[in-house]
Structure formats: C-alpha cells, structure tokens
Image: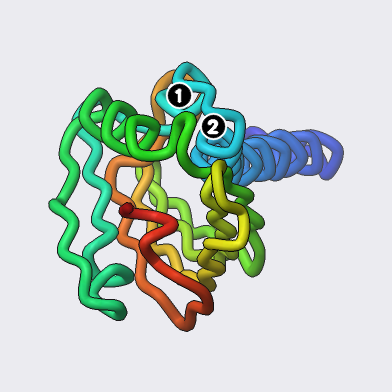
Amino acid sequence: MYVTSDRALAAHDSVAVVAELRDRTEIIDALYRFGLGQDLKDAELFASSFAADAELDFRPAAAKWGAQPPLMVGRDTIVSTILGMFTDRVETTHQVTNTRVSIDGDTARLTALVEAQHLLAGNPATHALLKNPYDVDLVRDGDRWVISRLRIDNAWFTGDPTAIFG
C-alpha cells in the first residue's frame, strides 16, 4: 500500500493553487489588454486579447442611446473596426473593476465593470463616460487566455455618445 505524505499532498496543492492563480491573472489580463490596446491605439496589444474567431457585441450598450452597431466577428474585424473608429479621432481610457472569474478546464467566464471615457481628439469638450458591465467568455491559447466572446452592456452614461461613434 502506498501512503502519500502530508508534505507531498501540500506540494501538490501548492502547484494547483499557483496554476489557478496564474490562470486567473491571465484571464483578467486579457481584459486589460483589450482596454489598454484601445487606449494606446496599439493594434498588436489589442489583437492579443482576442481569439481569431472572437465576437464583440457592443449592441446592448449602444441600444441605450439609440445606436445600432453591428456584431463584430473575428479578431481582425474587431481590431480594424474599433481602432479605425478611434485612431486620430477619439482618446479613450478604460478602468476595469469588480472582476469575477470562473474557470472550467480550458474555458473561463469573466464579469467586470468597465468605466470607459471617450474624448474627441479635436474637441475634448465632446465626451462620453460609460459604466459598462462586461460579460466575457475566454479560451486558453497556450499559456495565455484570450477573449472568445465579449458582450458589453451599459449601466449608465453621461455626455455625448457621438464621441464614440461619430
């Protein structure tokens, strides 16, 4: 009969805890890359947050002020659409709070509140400040986690939403 020592069990538990903490950090980092990639207009950083076949659904948030953006499908479409709308036109800052993560093997779910400020570059008096609940599905991609589906709703906004869509 093989008896496992308490030390061996503790070492095994420590490895599992470290792996879970690393996953949680990487999952939240995918959302940080999403926000900071926009803020810096860094296409490579922004793209690194998404799976190749990702979906970005901003329609629930935009519906609050009558806009009807399309469902964006595919990393390249998401990056070119978002950065195409913002580069040289809109300055943004994104702050991520209240993150909650659940992991199931190589998939995960993340919810968060994101405050997003949008200022027109040529007229900073035209701005929109949004508080948005995010619902995010992620998949493991090697050592990183990437967004497979991102649904953005809106709790409240102030300012002029044309700062976002023109």
Query: Who's the residue at 40% across and 75% down the image?
Result: 154
Look at the image and name its color scheme: rainbow
Q: Give the secondary structure at mark 1.
A: loop
Q: Nearer the viewer, residue 127 or 29?
A: 127
For marks 1 and 2, give the one nearer the viewer. 2
Residue 62 percent across, percent down from the top left: 28, 68
Q: Is residue 79 visible?
A: yes
x, y percent for residue 89:
46, 38
Mark earlier in primary sequence (1, 2): 2
Task: Indicate the amino acid at tag 1.
Answer: Ser
Residue 82 at x, y = what percent?
34, 38
Q: Is the N terminus in the top left, top right, bottom left or bottom right quadrant?
A: top right
Q: Is residue 106 left or right of residue 54?
A: right
Q: Are marks 1 and 2 in contact (CB under 8 Å)?
A: yes
Instruction: Determine whether 139 is above or below 102 in the image.
Output: above
Looking at the image, the residue that sits furthest to the right is 7
- The residue identified by callout 1 is 48
Residue for point 83% across, 44% down: 6
Characterize the local packing of mark 1: few (<14), some (14-19) or many (20 or more) Cα atoms within 10 angstroms: some
Task: Report the disc number at residue 101.
Answer: none
**Mark 2: amino acid:** Gly
Depicted 39 relative to depicted 166: above or below:
above
At a point 51% along the width and 66% down the height, the residue shown is: 128
Is residue 4 in view?
Answer: no
Q: Secondary structure at mark 2?
A: helix
Circle 2 packing at 10 Å, graded few (<14), some (14-19), many (20+), is many
Residue hosting label 2: 37
